[in-house]
Amino acid sequence: PLQLSNSYLILPGFVDIHVHFRDWGLAYKETLMGGARSALAGGVVAVGDMPNTKPHIRTAELYRRRMEEGSRLPIIYRLHMGVPEDVGELHAAKPRSVKIYPEDVERYGWGHVEAVGRACAELGCLLVFHCEDPAYFRGGDRPPEAELACVERAWAVARRTGTRIHLTHVTLPQTAELSRGWATVDVTPHHLLLDRENCRHRGLCHVNPRLRTPELRRGLLAALAAGMIDVYATDHAPHTLEEKNSGDPPPGICSLDVALSLLLSLWRAGVVDLGDVVRLYSCRPSRLLGVDVGIERGLFTVVKLEEFVVRGGEFAGSCLHTPFEGFRAFGRVVATAVGGRVYFSNGEVYDISPHVDRA
Ligand code: DOR
Ligand code: ZN
Ligand code: ZN
């Protein structure tokens, strides 16, 4: 039986393949260092950052510049490149992965996505889909059918180009089934734990893809419990509290500081076991990003097995609000080490010198 008081776990470093660290023209929402601080506080030692920065990372030059800035962080930094207008930019940048947005489909069409897939097959990179077909968006709504239609399109791209495909933040149990054999999938803490009924704050609960019905959410939890989900990832997407409280709030949820604890809560609730936690948020994502985060490499996270209440105001990064406010989470991160150096302990990030990363 689980001993709850004074019990600690030493776990391998955790890896989040889907974060938005903003900076550049959106530094007022979050900075690269702010994002890294959230990661360390959450026991996360490596991240895959998204390219929808301002400007969007669609060229080899921007890709190189961002990677250089990321390499100065105290965590391991990876970057998903944006869809370039000219696929030659992919050959110049040689990214490990490319992120496809519904906006890219709207802008360039599925034919161009297939051309990107072909280039990726040659380069050995991974196509990461935010899988919602914009043809199914209607009057501001983004229904579940948009996800299913995109999965079918992505399958066609996989079949025709032979490239590796990952579907990120999937929201439907059906997607987990349909992707079997040709794509890997991840789910977010918010699509697992929040739905249209239990998340009430208009701004803080607004996210793309949208929160679903309680029935679909329970289906997603069941898919996770059945081992049909490959990876857990936050889609940590900061906006200011002012923006989230406005009449037209932008989509995006902050959860990087507490994502591991939320997953450990699912362990405590019996939805997953501890091996699943490590597979979903460390082993498999580390393989997708091509990083090695084993304890023997000095990358590890110490967790204290106690319950605590989530308070956005106590987060360590730039974003201090979350729809998980008030949640009873289990498993507090008490230390995070990268490359043998402890960067986070006693509730504080106290060392921000760069992690030396020989990628
Ligand atoms: O909710 C979302 N926020 N979904 C996205 O696809 C983008 C993200 C953001 O960058 O804010
Ligand atoms: Zn997305
Ligand atoms: Zn995202």
Image (tube, rainbow, N blue to C red):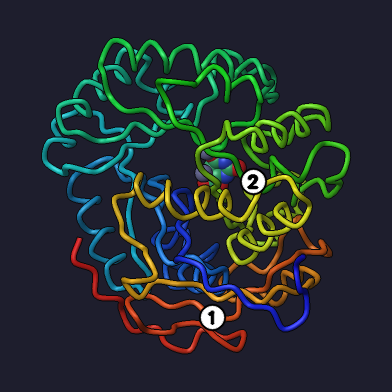
User: What residue lies at 30% left-to-right and 78% top-to-bottom?
Assistant: 354
User: What residue lies at 48% left-to-right and 89% top-to-bottom?
Assistant: 350
Q: Which mark is residue 250?
A: 2
- Residue 58 place in picture, x, y as percent: 28, 40
Dot 2 crowding, Cα within 10 Å, few <14, some 14–19, many 20+? some
Residue 38 in view of the camera: yes
Say above or below: 156 vs 316: above
- Residue 46 place in picture, x, y as percent: 40, 62
User: What residue lies at 32% left-to-right and 55% top-to-bottom?
Assistant: 78
Q: Is residue 347 left or right of residue 105?
A: right
- Residue 69 place in picture, x, y as percent: 28, 66
User: What residue lies at 21% left-to-right and 25% top-to-bottom?
Assistant: 121
The quadrant holding residue 42 is bottom right
Q: Which secondary structure, mark 2?
A: loop
- Residue 229 place in picture, x, y as percent: 56, 35
Amino acid type at mark 2: Pro
Residue occupied by mark 1: 335
* Quadrant containing ligand 1: top right
Residue 53 in view of the camera: no
Amino acid type at mark 1: Ala
Mark nearest the camera among 2 and 1 is: 1
